């Protein structure tokens, strides 16, 4: 566990952004808005985020969206199209492609297991 007293300001900012992403998977992600909110340049924000999480902000968001979708497909009977929107994808085909690339199975195949 990370000692909050040892966290730097940039760690706190990147952690807040990570939490924001996780809590707002259905919303579009705009790094400029996030950088304005935390009064740091986009370049600096992206660099600090990648240093902390070993992923870009967009890679992190995509991973969280796909993991949430996997969970919803496994644990609920919600339609795939509804889950697609719930995790922030505008296109079912884009969602299916990215899901398959990540998990080597389509959402429909996962649902039918």
Image: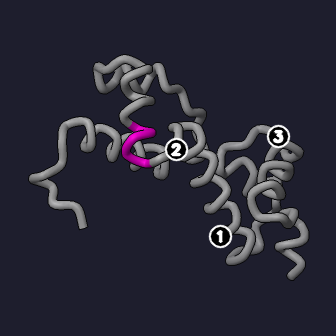
Residue plotted at (63% across, 46% down) = 62
Please say if the residues under marks 2 and 3 sit with CB atoms less than 8 Å apart. no
Q: Are there few (<14), some (14-19), or many (20+) residues within 10 Å of tag 2? A: some
Q: Are there few (<14), some (14-19), or many (20+) residues within 10 Å of tag 1? A: few
Residue 97 numbered mark, or none: none
Q: Are there few (<14), some (14-19), or many (20+) residues within 10 Å of tag 3? A: few
Give SS at disc 2. Answer: loop
Please say if the residues under marks 3 and 1 sit with CB atoms less than 8 Å apart. no
Quarter assignment of residue 14: top left
Provide residue 8's location: percent of width, then percent of height.
18, 41
Check the picture and name the quadrant holding the N terminus: bottom left
Of the image marks 3 and 1, the number of the one nearer the N terminus: 1
- Relative to 29, 89 lies left or right: right
Helix, strand or loop: magenta stretch: helix
Distance between the Cα atoms at labels 2 and 3? 23 Å
Provide residue 107's location: percent of width, then percent of height.
83, 64
Of the image marks 2 and 3, the number of the one nearer the N terminus: 2
Examine the structure image and report whether residue 50 is included in the region drawn in magenta: yes
Q: Residue furthest bottom?
A: 113
Quarter assignment of residue 17: top left
What residue sits right under mark 1 in the picture? 71
Residue 55 numbered mark, or none: 2
Question: How many marks on residues?
Answer: 3
Highlighted magenta segment, given as a residue range: 49-53
Provide residue 31's location: percent of width, then percent of height.
49, 26
Quarter assignment of residue 113: bottom right
């Amino acid at each position: 566990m990370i000692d909050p007293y040892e966290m730097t300001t940039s760690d706190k900012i990147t952690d807040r952004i990570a939490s924001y992403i996780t809590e707002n998977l259905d919303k579009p992600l705009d790094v400029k808005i996030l950088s304005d909110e935390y009064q740091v340049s986009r370049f600096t924000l992206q660099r600090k985020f990648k240093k902390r999480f070993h992923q870009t902000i967009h890679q992190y968001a995509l991973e969280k969206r796909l993991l949430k979708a996997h969970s919803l497909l496994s644990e609920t009977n919600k339609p795939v199209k509804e889950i697609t929107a719930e995790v922030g994808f505008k296109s079912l085909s884009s969602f299916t492609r990215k899901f398959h690339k990540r998990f080597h199975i389509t959402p429909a195949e996962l649902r039918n297991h």
